[in-house]
Amino acid sequence: MRSISLFFRSVTKSLILVSFLSMAAANSASAQDAAAGAAIFKQKCTACHGIEKAVVGPALKGIDTKYDEAFLLKWIKNAPAFIASGDALAVKASEYSPAMMSAFPELSDDDIKNIIAYVKVGDPKPAADPNAAQAGTGGAASSVGVSNFMLFGLLAVIIIAFLVVLVLNKVIQTLERVMLQKKGLAVEEEDAVDKDRFAGLKKLSKNKKFILFIVLLSVIFLGSAGWKGMWDTGVHTGYQPVQPIKFSHQLHAGVNKIDCQYCHSGAFSSKNASIPSLNVCMNCHNYVTASEKYAGKTSPEIMKIYTALDYNQDTKQYGENTKPVEWIRIHNLPDLAYFNHSQHVSVAGIECQKCHGPIQTMEEVYQYSPLTMKWCINCHRETEVNHKDNPYYDKLIAAHDKLKKGEKVTAAVLGGLECSKCHY
């Protein structure tokens, strides 16, 4: 009987342990599902839908209670086909907006369930800021004050620690003198000790070898510091100016996976990568307002785009009081250097991250590479030219073959008609 009761006890403990682990795994899985759904939603859905605000399509808050999961799976995967099948509920849902719901056949059932899980929980609400009503300069001043307080506090701690060390050192010397006096040993007077110390310093100051050594060290140190300072002149690695609009490459190129050349279209076909016009921004932000994070109001950064374009969000009309956004250039080469984006992007097939770093992870862009002559030369020494099935090199080979045969080869054949050959 005892063995049976022990068996049941062990089984009961195992069941309890398995239950707790299952609950923990379920909670973890649901959290992971919502996180995965957030990434998919922001990539594929935000152009037409908000969670709490209607955009082109309806607000999706509570959509899981209005429609069952089976319906949503069919609707999201291929709404046009679902409507064409004659399903009454699908036809009724299509009447909400004249814009047809896009089909997403590439999404799996798990992907769609993840999106539904994210729509249920939404984004975490930002904590209320008691200083939000203050002016922007006031907020900046408060943050500067905090950092100054920390700096002066740290300096005060260092000074106090130094004074404590001096006091303790003095106390230790006094105790040593008292102990020596109790033992009947002779104690040197402090003045005599100090005189001896100063005598040693005076002796060192008259030592020519020691003076020569100090002078050599000073020359080496100052020369190295000067050389490094001159070498780094004009090198702006890590340069990160404050831009007029806080554009997040991490959100656009990282989370939403927007191709670099969608905005910087010149990189593929011209010398300059070009800064996109605000009309490119409005292709998405005519609908996407990021209102979920700002209590139903349009993001203040997106509002800067609307202000620059004199765009009325309610009437969807553009005014005449437009003004350009004064972006601050980050990557800048000297006038003596010539760099052609198309030659590197189109011909060499080099990715943007090769020079600009992991741009898809940068909340605010900074200069990642030094962009020095040495850095460019090292890259040219290491990069292998891929000439297979490349029309640029095919033209060069054809031109060389003509030269070998003595045929006429004009500058146009070698790319002499490209605009960037003459126009910087």
Image: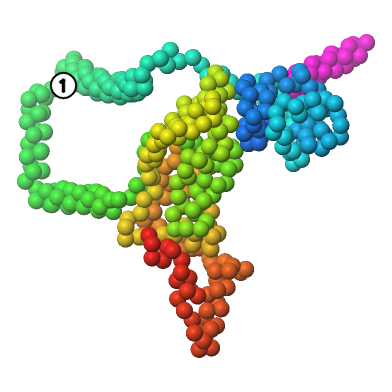
Q: Is residue 68 left or right of residue 131?
A: right
Amino acid under disc 1 = Leu
Is residue 103 shown above or below 390?
above
Is residue 319 shown above or below 52?
below
Q: How many numbered marks are there? A: 1
Q: Which residue is mark 1?
A: 185
At mark 1, the secondary structure is loop
Q: Is residue 146 visible?
A: no
Identify the residue shown where x is 66% and y is 36%: 44
Tell me the quarter of the image containing the N terminus. top right
Tell me the quarter of the image containing the C terminus. bottom left
Crowding at dot 1, Cα within 10 Å, few <14 / some 14-19 / many 20+, comes out as few
Residue 120: x and y in percent read: 69, 21
Rendered image quadrant of residue 144: top left
Identify the residue shown where x is 51% and y is 58%: 269
Residue 187: x and y in percent read: 13, 22
Residue 60 lies within the magenta run: no
Depth check: give the residue in front, 211 or 26: 26
Residue 48: x and y in percent read: 64, 31
Q: What's drawn in magenta, residue-wise?
A: 1-27
Identify the residue shown where x is 52% and y is 51%: 265
Spot the residue most to the right: 1
Q: Is residue 91 left or right of residue 181?
A: right
Q: Is residue 96 left or right of residue 139?
A: right
Spot the residue most to the bottom: 406
